[in-house]
């Protein structure tokens, strides 16, 4: 199906199903119940899942396949956002040209940065990419203010030209990003008993792009190009002496993953038409590294899961404050509940980073293959049981 | 005129003259062995042939054109394949993938971005890889992780990866180093078979005299960076200078 092997096609269908039914899957708890704060099925967060999924899928093409750890990928995300917002300012509020420009501009940036950075490998490569990204960040904050809006960020204004659109709506507002009349922010709600599910145009747009990106990533993984990238990670010396030049391959991987990042940045701007320099900061670059490692480096679905997990923790854990905790532990005797609130409070709210840090360390130490390895181990345990059963029944020799 | 012509090649590392005025001519479709005690400059010479090192003086001509200043991948594309002292393979990839990469390099050159079509759709390359694996008796290991194989198998795989490109010149850097006797004999048989079946020239660096004398048509003895003597195996065996510089020592051990 789609030119994919059965296993990959199934994976694609699985991700498609997750994406389509996300508003249901992420909202398992009835509205107004005590658990409702764990619901993640609101448009803003679902868009983030899809957007950062794209970002991580692209990053994994570079890091997962070639082993080159870029520490400056957020620069391409930021560049993509700026490009998209400029398209909204100058051309029209249609998201398609904005996204196309975001991908092209970030691809050009990646070409230049990659060309220089890929002269080195290992830690030196990481440092070079980090330096470039921080440079982009610093420039966006200072001298490039006319283009980037500096500290306030790049925003739409009522007097923007928008040659193919309108500068302002008849009501005198700034128009919103859309796709041929479909506004990205539009959603409709469906109530089933106490449950409320939100379906948002912007989210489904992001989800479709995410699925296309995922499909493209599968094709790259299974192509001769993908195999060469894995060969680069495995043994560059042998690759050289086999008559292949690793440089253009790594550069192509770098540019492709930079374009993925630009696509994610363009989508971010399409959901919320503003762009700020903080999107390029090194913490943002570190985040995509975390996502990829949490999910499983070099696996297809890992980065998507990692992005989901990290964004879920960021948005849900940080919402839990002391008041909520006191509610949870109120059934306990006074002194005990205070202790529990105090202890739990260290890991939620503003301190959600601590939880992420602990989970990240646990994953690195016990599950170097990330969430995907966890899944494999669990399914392996079941399979082993099945094997044991069949073996005792048939008494076949083990392989 | 040989397929490989080394003229007056010299290489100096700081104060050490690793190679001085090496002249070597490898005739087409022969097996030429380069022997010599440790530190004689054998590996340095080899590295000068494949583009890893650039000699300070002299010239290296392969098949009518110079290899100097070219990078290893360009030299490979000219038709030189190299087997390393410790097998260099793609450990994270399967045996089959290890075979496919040299085939792609042979067909598509040093670089081609074919990112959309799947590897599995390259039927004719897969067929060639299968044939080669059958030739080296590894077809049953095709889906194995290359890193998980024994050293002997890794060596055979590396050899197969080089041969599948149909190189004009195969360079072997101590192909039997650290091998058990049985594995060594297998390797000798494999190389003999290759020599008979293919129009290939082999240059081999080797410590093991058993290997050298069973394979080589001509032998160059290198000592302290310069060729001591070049002759047929029969003459080398009895050569007094060689006995003194190299074989004598080995036999005493």
Image: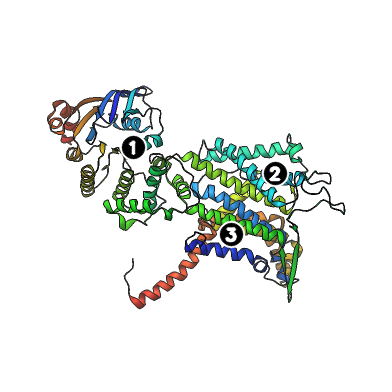
Q: Determine whether label 1 and label 3 are within 8 Å by CB.
A: no
SS of the residue under disc 3: helix
Asked whether residue B136 appears in the rendered view, the answer is no
SS of the residue under disc 2: helix
Q: Chain of mark 3?
A: A
Residue occupying the point 38% across, 32% down? B51
Q: Chain of mark 2?
A: A
State the CA–CA distance, disc 1 to disc 3.
46 Å
Q: Quadrant of the rendered structure where residue A302 is? A: bottom right
Q: Above or below — where is A347 with respect to B47?
A: below
B48 or B244, which is in the foreground?
B48
Mark 3 sits on what residue?
A305
B42 or B129, which is in the foreground?
B129
Q: Position of residue A130 (x, y in %)?
A: 60, 40
B76 or A1, which is in the foreground?
A1
Residue occupying the point 65% across, 42% down? A105
The single residue placed furthest to the front in the displayed view is: A164
Q: Above or below — where is A386 with respect to A15?
A: below
Q: Quadrant of the rendered structure where residue B33 is? A: top left
Q: Chain of mark 1?
A: B
Q: Determine whether label 1 and label 2 are within 8 Å by CB.
A: no
Q: Position of residue A232 (x, y in %)?
A: 45, 44
Mark 2 sits on what residue?
A83
Relative horizontal placement of residue B164, taking residue A69 as reference (left or right) = left
SS of the residue under disc 1: loop
Q: Report the disc number at residue B79.
A: 1
Relative horizontal placement of residue A321, taking residue A382 as reference (left or right) = right
């Amino acid at each position: 199906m789609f030119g994919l092997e059965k296993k990959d096609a199934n994976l694609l269908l699985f991700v498609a199903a997750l994406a389509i039914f996300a508003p249901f899957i992420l909202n398992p708890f009835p509205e107004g119940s005590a658990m409702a704060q764990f619901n993640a099925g609101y448009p803003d967060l679902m868009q983030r899942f899809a957007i950062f999924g794209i970002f991580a899928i692209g990053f994994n093409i570079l890091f997962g396949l070639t082993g080159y750890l870029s520490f400056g990928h957020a620069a391409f995300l930021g560049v993509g956002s700026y490009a998209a917002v400029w398209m909204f300012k100058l051309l029209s509020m249609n998201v398609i040209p904005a996204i196309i420009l975001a991908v092209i501009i970030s691809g050009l940036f990646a070409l230049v940065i990659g060309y220089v950075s890929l002269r080195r490998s290992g830690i030196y490569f990481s440092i070079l990419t980090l330096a470039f990204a921080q440079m982009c960040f610093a420039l966006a904050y200072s001298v490039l203010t006319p283009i980037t809006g500096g500290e306030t960020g790049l925003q739409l204004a009522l007097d923007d030209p928008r040659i193919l659109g309108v500068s302002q709506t008849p009501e005198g507002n700034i128009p919103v990003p859309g796709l041929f009349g479909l506004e990205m922010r539009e959603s409709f709600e469906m109530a089933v008993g106490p449950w409320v599910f939100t379906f948002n145009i912007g989210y489904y747009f992001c989800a479709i792009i995410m699925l296309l990106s995922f499909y493209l990533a599968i094709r790259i993984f299974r192509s001769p190009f993908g195999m060469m990238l894995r060969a680069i990670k495995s043994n560059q010396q042998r690759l050289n002496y086999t008559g292949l030049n690793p440089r253009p391959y790594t550069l192509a991987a770098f540019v492709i993953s930079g374009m993925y990042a630009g696509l994610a940045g363009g989508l971010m701007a399409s959901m919320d038409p503003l762009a700020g320099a903080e999107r390029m900061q090194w913490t943002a670059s570190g985040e995509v590294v975390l996502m990829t490692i949490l999910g499983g480096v070099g696996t297809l679905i890992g980065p998507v899961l990692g992005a989901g997990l990290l964004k879920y923790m960021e948005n849900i854990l940080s919402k839990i404050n002391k008041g909520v905790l006191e509610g949870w532990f109120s059934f306990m005797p006074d002194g005990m509940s205070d202790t529990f609130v105090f202890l739990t409070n260290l890991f939620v709210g503003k301190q959600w980073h601590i939880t992420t840090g602990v989970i990240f360390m646990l994953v690195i130490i016990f599950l170097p293959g990330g969430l995907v390895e966890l899944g494999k181990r669990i399914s392996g345990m079941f399979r082993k049981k099945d094997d044991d059963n069949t073996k005792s029944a048939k008494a076949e020799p083990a392989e | 005129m040989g397929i490989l012509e080394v003229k007056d090649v010299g290489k100096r590392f700081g104060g050490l003259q690793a190679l001085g005025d090496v002249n070597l001519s490898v005739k087409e479709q022969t097996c030429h062995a380069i022997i010599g005690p440790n530190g004689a400059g054998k590996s340095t010479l080899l590295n000068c042939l494949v583009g890893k090192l650039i000699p300070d003086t002299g010239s290296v001509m392969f098949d009518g054109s110079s290899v100097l200043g070219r990078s290893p991948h360009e030299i490979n594309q000219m038709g030189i394949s190299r087997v390393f002292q410790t097998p260099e393979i793609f450990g994270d990839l399967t045996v089959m993938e290890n075979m496919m990469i040299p085939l792609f390099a042979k067909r598509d050159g040093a670089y081609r971005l074919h990112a959309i079509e799947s590897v599995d759709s390259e039927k004719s390359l897969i067929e060639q890889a299968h044939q080669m694996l059958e030739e080296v008796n590894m077809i049953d290991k095709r889906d194995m992780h290359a890193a998980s194989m024994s050293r002997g198998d890794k060596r055979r795989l590396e050899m197969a990866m080089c041969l599948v490109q149909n190189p004009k010149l195969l360079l072997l850097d101590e192909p039997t180093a650290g091998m058990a006797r049985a594995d060594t004999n297998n390797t000798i048989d494999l190389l003999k078979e290759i020599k008979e079946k293919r129009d290939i020239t082999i240059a081999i660096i080797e410590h093991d005299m058993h290997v050298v004398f069973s394979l080589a048509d001509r032998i160059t003895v290198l000592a302290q960076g310069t060729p001591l003597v070049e002759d047929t195996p029969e003459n080398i065996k009895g050569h007094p200078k060689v006995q003194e510089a190299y074989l004598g020592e080995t036999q005493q051990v």
